[in-house]
Image: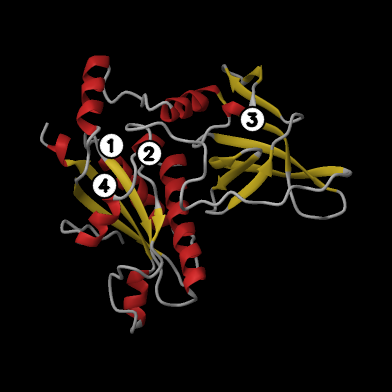
Amino acid sequence: MPVISKRPKFGLLLAVLALPLPGVLSAQPQAADPYIVVEGVRPPQGPMVKGPEIKGVISARKGEQVKVATANGGSTLVFVNDATKIKAASGLFGSSSGKLGADSLLNGLPVTVKTLQPADGSSGLVASQIAFRNTDLKTATMIRNATEQRFVEQTAATEALRGRMGDIDKYNIKSTTNVHFDTGKAELSAEDKANLCSTASTAQSTENALMLVVGYTDSTGTEEVNQQLSEKRANRVINYLQQVCGWKPYRMLTPTGMATADPAASNETEEGKAQNRRVAVNILVSKSVDDL
């Protein structure tokens, strides 16, 4: 069940203030963000065979390497070369608009990737085709260029809003919804999914609302494992909020995994550990626009 908190901890607020606002404040760089590492092994030269098809959202790029976050909370690294066919589909039947350049592969863009892999069984994937929708490309482009999809129809009002948000240094946390997980797991239950969409729907009616998603673990496991697990849980929630619940990427602050930090309860009991295995979905509004 979600837990609604009207009195968030001060430590969480400090963590929020340290994170940048994507889209509405500044252009999104194509480099990896601090919580996502883009490193992989280039596939060796030699015969290639058909690899897996990957569906997800581009989460980071570094040169010819593209990281795709998938709906299960994981991620896959693929390499792009001159032979990679990049195309956008539009129209009633998804007709193609032709081959595009690699500069169209923007962070936040939902894609379907067809891959090739080495015939000798070694690691590494090369994208033979990357496809996406024109509408998604337009949205990702707006995020990158900090032009934001309009909160209101009047351009002047939107530009004034952006000006007021430009110097944000404090937020009002309107509510926090927690979803919980089994030990070592990052799967969402049917109830969690319903609660996330309910939270997104409620937040949509809050003008200027932004969302911060933070993942946590209990004390089980090593520090490294817990850090990875907390990030995976946060990514799983973000993917569901954006892909299923319709929460727009430009209204999402940079996510983070906090591992065992800031426990909600004692890790000395099983009940306490269960409360700590969570992802907190925080709905925020800048104090500079909260009273507009």
From the image, tell me which residue sits under label 3. 131
Name the spot of residue 27 as percent of width and height, x first. Answer: 41, 31
Asked which secondary structure carries label 4, the reply is: strand
- The residue type indicated by label 3 comes to Ala
From the image, tell me which residue sits under label 4. 283
Name the spot of residue 6 as percent of width and height, x first. Answer: 16, 56
Query: Which mark is on residue 42?
Result: none
Q: Nearer the viewer, residue 103 or 204?
A: 103
Cβ–Cβ under 8 Å for marks 2 and 1: yes
Which residue is at 87% across, 49% downward?
Answer: 119
Which badge, 1 or 4, is on the more N-terminal residue?
1
Which badge, 2 or 1, is on the more N-terminal residue?
1
From the image, tell me which residue sits under label 1. 204
Crowd tier of the residue under label 4, counting other residues whose Cα lies within 10 Å: few below 14, some 14–19, many 20 or above: many
Which residue is at 29% across, 55% downward?
Answer: 15
Spatial CA distance of label 4 from label 3 is: 32 Å
Residue 2 placement: quadrant: bottom left
From the image, tell me which residue sits under label 2. 247
